[in-house]
Image (cartoon, rainbow, N blue to C red):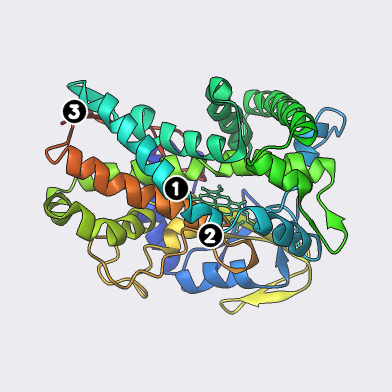
Amino acid sequence: MIDFQSPEFHEDPYPELAELRTHGKPVWHDETGMFLAARHADANAVLRDKNLGRIFQPRTPEDQWFDFNWLHADSILDSEPPKHTRLKSLISKAFNPVTIRAMRPDIERLAGALLDRAADREEFDLIGDIAEPLPVKVIAHLLGFPESDEHLLRPWSQAIVKMYEVSPTDQHKADARAAAHDFADYVHGLMVERKKNPGTDLISVLAAVEEDGQSLNTHELIATCVLLLNAGHEASVNGFGNGAVAALSRPDALAPLREDPRGIGPTAVEEFLRFDSPLQLFERTATAETEIGGVRIAAGQKIAALLGSANRDEDVFDRSTEMDLTRQRNPHIGFGAGIHFCIGAPLARVEMNVLLPAVFERFPRMELTREPHRRPGFVLRGYESVHVSH
Ligand code: HEM
């Protein structure tokens, strides 16, 4: 059975995930105490099943985990209806496809400036110089997070998201507790200031948002901002990095994008997210007995949707193990499904649709210069650095 801690599995999980799919139904995983849904149909069903919820289990001792716990319990991602419905409706008033479309010129300008800087050097890091700063700057700008403090975001976020791995270490736990406290404290300060002097940024707008007499309370407001700041860059960095490494390692697959970056860009973005998905596993807990792929899930039992595996399912995708940047039919579930479907998908798609063609237009001969360095872990799949020449 899969060893989620194994460095070999982290390096290339896909052969073992393919084996898991041959069972044809969710499989019980003893070490983690949950079912694993590896097929597309099963993972998709897990995300859409009304009897399977994101049930946040507060960490203990609760006094030590106080900030970490409410940052999750009061966020949209870790809520279920009716609270999820209320938070989603309030957040969508401020954060929606219209606000996002309006950001495209800013995103193009930011991407252009990053590419200019990279062009001055013979070799650069696709992650540290391009894929990471773009979404960090975009989400920071959107929320009105001061530019001078942007460097704080990735370390806070990295420390918190390490808790989403299957078995975090004691050091990871201590780092996550400290980061949750500092991040919440900082955003609280910004919120108090914006309530006094509102601007056009998302923090000000969220602080003012109201519907049918309902508004976000202080914890919900801070939790929403922290979630948007974290989720708003973490997967975007890795989605771009994973796809870029896969493409640069496969010259034949990359050829159409090199030839026509703008024409191929939109299908290439979706194939990047399918082929080596940045988020691999999401857990659900049964609130009542249910059934997935013919397997009975009793109330209280856990089941995980394996998104990266679902996106390689040979029953859904032709030549599922091949990267095809011109792929037309691509029903990947990299952004999830059901009520928790990614609220940031329109923003992530604009960012990637701006960045991907721009990078290959500017650097048509771009090549890897050394073996890219992966981050350890499975749930959040990405690279530390990806050095390229142009
Ligand atoms: C390539 C980039 C991204 C990927 C692959 C991605 C993927 C996902 C996935 C799979 C989920 C569902 C989790 C679940 O079902 O348990 C999700 C939820 C979410 N994402 Fe993203 N995401 C990306 C970018 C973003 C961005 C840019 C933002 C915000 C600016 C964002 C904000 C959120 C939020 C707030 C949720 C929770 C929605 C809810 O619970 O209703 N994401 N994302």
Callout 1 touching callout 3 (CB < 8 Å): no
User: Would you place residue 255 above or below residue 287 in this image?
Assistant: above
Q: Which residue is mark 1?
A: 278
**Hey, what amino acid is under mark 2?**
Pro
**Hey, what amino acid is under mark 3?**
Thr
For residue 57, say whether it is visible.
Answer: no
* Label 2 CA crowd tier, 10 Å (few <14, some 14–19, many 20+): some
Give the image location of residue 233, x and y in percent: 50, 40
Q: Gap in Å between the C-alphas at discs 2 and 3?
A: 38 Å
Q: Residue at x 47, y 48 (%)?
A: 103
Q: Residue at x 63, y 49 (%)?
A: 32
* Label 1 CA crowd tier, 10 Å (few <14, some 14–19, many 20+): many
Q: Which of label 2 and label 3 is nearer to you?
A: 2
Does 241 sit left or right of 299 as displayed?
Answer: left
Q: Which residue is mark 3?
A: 369
Does 218 sit left or right of 6 as displayed?
Answer: right
Pick the front one: 154 or 34: 154
Mark 1 falls on what kind of element? loop
Pick the front one: 156 or 309: 156
**Hey, what amino acid is under mark 1?**
Pro
Does 153 sit left or right of 329 as displayed?
Answer: right
| Among the two numbered marks 1 and 3 on one chain, the one whose residue lies closer to the N terminus | 1
Mark 2 falls on what kind of element? helix
Q: Quadrant of the C terminus?
A: top left
Q: Gap in Å between the C-alphas at discs 1 and 2?
A: 22 Å
Q: Which residue is mark 2?
A: 97
Q: Which mark is residue 388?
A: none
Give the image location of residue 313, x and y in percent: 38, 68
Residue at mark 1: C-beta within 8 A of ligand 1: yes
Give the image location of residue 281, x and y in percent: 54, 53
User: Would you place residue 360 above or below residue 41 in this image?
Assistant: above
Does 196 sit left or right of 335 as displayed?
Answer: right
